[in-house]
Image (cartoon, helix red, strand yellow):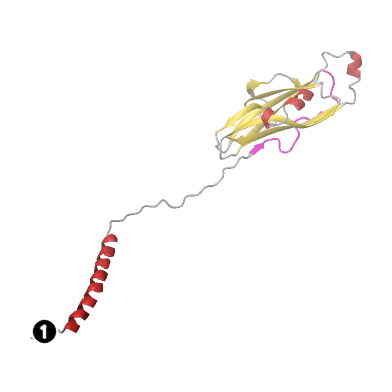
Amino acid sequence: MQQPTARTRRLATLIVGPTAILLAGLMVWQGSNAAFTATTRNTGSNWQTGSVILSDDDLGAAAFRIDGVTPGQTGSKCLVVTSQSTVPGQVRTYVQNLGAQGLENNITISLQIGTGGSFADCTGFVPTTTLPPLSLATIGAGINDYATGVLPWTTAGISGETTVYRATWTFDVTTLTQAQIDALQGKSVSVDVVWELQSS
């Protein structure tokens, strides 16, 4: 058998060295990729805002529109407020747009919250909370936004929740002289009653 020449041995040495390094590298690469793997995933995460919606049963009519009011006269009206909200919150009552034209100190309002009755008829209304009578001037000055609102009603965020409010007004002249009463002839006052729901 013929022995390899010196040149062949040198060539073999030059080839074997890099080849061994390359093979060793491939083995290390394969070893580093031969690990156990597993994944899990929760798909479809999504965020959507809730909504707050209030309505009432007045069908667009004013609760009180009374002409020819006389001293000592009184009256009541109920209103069913319904929450169609999908988030919990609190409803508060306040007034806006006070049109003070002479009767604002003499028309008093007592507000109540309770159950039973409707805008058409207060029959069956049972109060759970009552505010003492206050003049529209006092109410307009101090109960005129959500922060100062009264008769809080906490809703659970279930569509269709309702509660009933009753307002009782009186043309109060108990502290006036006859001359002061006579001076109120032809005077008036107007106001908007607001129920506002804010989510908690």
Magenta residues span 54-71
User: Circle 1 is placed at which residue position?
Assistant: 3
Name the spot of residue 141 as percent of width and height, x first. 76, 26
Residue 53, given in percent of the width and then of the height, sits at 63, 40
Image side of residue 38 versus residue 178, left or right: left
Task: Identify the element where label 1 is drawn.
Answer: loop
Residue ID at (92%, 15%): 179
Nearer-the-camera pick, 189 or 45: 45
Rendering coords of residue 136 (x, y %)? 78, 25
Instruction: State whether residue 132 is above or below residue 159.
Output: above
23 lies left or right of 5: right
Residue at 83% x, 16% y is: 173
Name the residue nearer the viewer: 52 or 188: 52
Q: Quadrant of residue 177?
A: top right
Which residue does the image show at 23% across and 77% down from the upper left? 14
Magenta span: chief secondary structure = loop
